[in-house]
Image: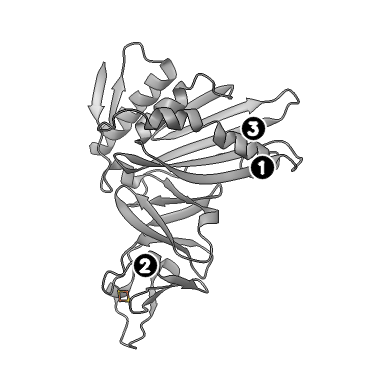
Amino acid sequence: MTSAVIGFSATGPFGRQWSPVASSADVQDSPAAARLLGRNLVLWRSPSGAVVAAPDLCTHSKGDLTKGEVNEGLLVCPKHGWTFGDEGRCVFKPSGLPINDKAHLKIHSCTERYGLIWVSLNDPSVPLINLAWDGDGLHRRIHSSVSVWKSNPIRIVEELLAQPNSPFDDVTADVPFVVQGTSKSGDGVQQRRLVSCAPIDSRHSVVATVVWTTNGAHGDDAKVADEATADLDDAQSAAESGTVLTPSIDIASDEDASSADWKRRLLAFVGQARD
Ligand code: FES
């Protein structure tokens, strides 16, 4: 048995990963709240249309920016009205006093892809996962959603790989917490699914799900999406059951080959990141 306790901190290796924190649908006309690696974030769509991610803390007097409002892409703090635009820059103070550099928000790296908002708290060490079929003209993305599970992402990926009734023909896991699967129905329609997890803290995770289909007809999209999320119910129940333990990577001598391989790569990822 190989075992290693894993810490989830914003300053560690997971803080340099791209993590899903919200769906694009969650970030529209008002500030959205998100949590990642113990940090509270505010997300909003700025005047350029790009989503901005910043600490949920006003630079003036620590107001909760998620309790403010967005006016034409500008985020307005609820306490005294300081206003922030593209790249978190402070663009207005009701007092009329000069705006110095300390007034601007220290934003995080943030991008929008696959219908999700992805954040890296520090400089990302690797590019965002590239899924060649997204937008290839053959596959249609029909669903993107985010939920919070009461478990750590190591255990969640373990359960996603272990489900005996998985509807997929093949399931693969990539570091740190990405699971992909495909399936093909009798009429040749292929479905692809991505589940990407991110640690909120040692006991909670963001779980983002994206579904694509090669079915050109649009009629059954909602049904397919509902089934795709329902397929995760067993894994969620299993991942949330029992005593919540300190997150660790445990490789048993009789572990399934794909799970053991993913865990070895995760150990290497954490070890390399420590160097
Ligand atoms: S705390 Fe935000 S404007 Fe004062």
Rendered position, 109 above or below 210:
below
Identify residue for label 3: 191
Q: What element carries label 1?
A: helix
**Would you identify the image quadrant in which residue 215 lies?**
top right
Identify residue for label 1: 222
Ligand 1 near label 2 (Cβ, under 8 Å)? Answer: yes
Point 60% across, 44% down: residue:
143
At label 1, the amino acid type is Ala
Q: Residues within 10 Å of mark 1 (few under 14, many from 20)?
A: few
Instruction: Give the x, y percent position of residue 68.
Output: 41, 70
At label 3, the amino acid type is Gln
Q: Residues within 10 Å of mark 3 (few under 14, many from 20)?
A: many
- Front one among 29 and 48: 29
Point 26% across, 45% down: residue:
9
Q: CA gap, disc 1 to disc 3?
A: 14 Å
Q: Which of marks 2 and 3 is nearer the N terminus?
A: 2
- Asked whether, in this view, residue 229 is left or right of residue 7, the answer is right
Q: Does the image show residue 132?
A: no
Instruction: Give the x, y percent position of residue 78.
Output: 37, 74
Rendered position, 111 above or below 137:
below
Q: Earlier in the sequence, mark 1 or mark 3?
A: 3
Instruction: Give the x, y percent position of residue 86.
Output: 45, 69
Instruction: Name the mark nearer the viewer: 1 or 2.
Output: 1
Instruction: Name the mark nearer the viewer: 1 or 3.
Output: 1
